[in-house]
Amino acid sequence: MPFQFLNFKSRISLALMLALLSVGCQQAAQPANQRAENANPLATPAPATISTSADDLPTIVAFGDSLTAGFGLSQEQSYTTLLQRKLEERGFKYRVVNAGVSGDTSAGGARRIDWALESGNVKILILELGGNDGLRGLPAAEMKKNLELIIQRAQARGVTVLLAGMEAPTNFGAEYTREFRQVFRDLAREYKTPFIPFVLEGVGGDPRMNQSDGIHPNAEGEKVMTETIWRALEPLLEKP
């Protein structure tokens, strides 16, 4: 694994503890759509609002947690907006729908996947979930079951799934970290999905690319994450 990733694993648990300690000070100052990340971690987050369109453009659903929702950033800075812009600049006729919910786990995603797949002529699902499972030390086997259900529901509708892998912090032990990582690799192999091994490649652990919590990408980090996703996404698109 890259050096940045090793730093990310060793620092993320401390960053999470500091973030939790500062909830009382930060929550009142945050916009309402960003407070879910600091809510009770066991609470089920409210679904994000998916806007509908009268046209029938093929739709790419970005389905994930705060990394997809763009926590701490403006809409213009989020990776889904950057991705939409990149598609348009290159002449691809797709609509990107942001179905990210801050604080969501794989279990939350499994509960709302059917709703998310109703957001138009869905052709591709970018599946970015698991980070919050790892931060909370939730069983890797349960995460696999939830992600598997999401993939199955999408593929049953003829939707191509782009699986975005995540890494767990090291504070739950080497065995958990290994099992967590293997879940994504096994699912990609079993369901033959396009696969990004680590969606925060080049971002995780780099202070220049992250907000002050050390977990969420800043505007520059979003640009790097967008490029990582684009490299895996572009081969899946119908040429203009």
Image: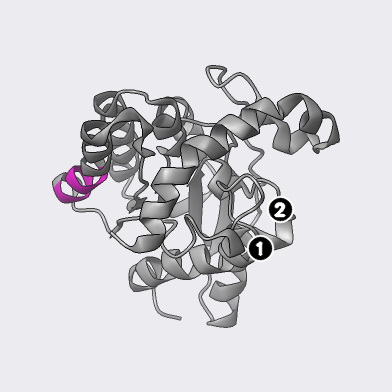
Residue in the foreground of this view, choosing between 190 and 52: 190
The residue type indicated by label 2 comes to Leu
Residue in the foreground of this view, choosing between 146 and 174: 174
Comes first in the chain, label 1 or label 2: 2
Image coordinates for residue 4, horizontal then vertical, percent: 41, 60
The residue type indicated by label 1 comes to Ala
Residue under the point 71% across and 30% down: 22
Image coordinates for residue 209, horizontal then vertical, percent: 58, 62
Residue 106 visible in the shown view: yes
> In this picture, which residue range is highlighted in magenta?
184-189
Look at the image and say whether residue 187 sits in the magenta stretch: yes
Evaluate if marks 1 and 2 touch, with contact meaning CB atoms under 8 Å apart: yes
Which label number is shown at residue 237?
none
Image coordinates for residue 71, horizontal then vertical, percent: 65, 45
Which label number is shown at residue 219?
1
As drawn, 134 above or below 227: above
Residue 113 occupies quadrant: top left
In the picture, measured across the screen, residue 149 lies left or right of residue 218, that is left
Look at the image and say whether residue 145 sits in the magenta stretch: no
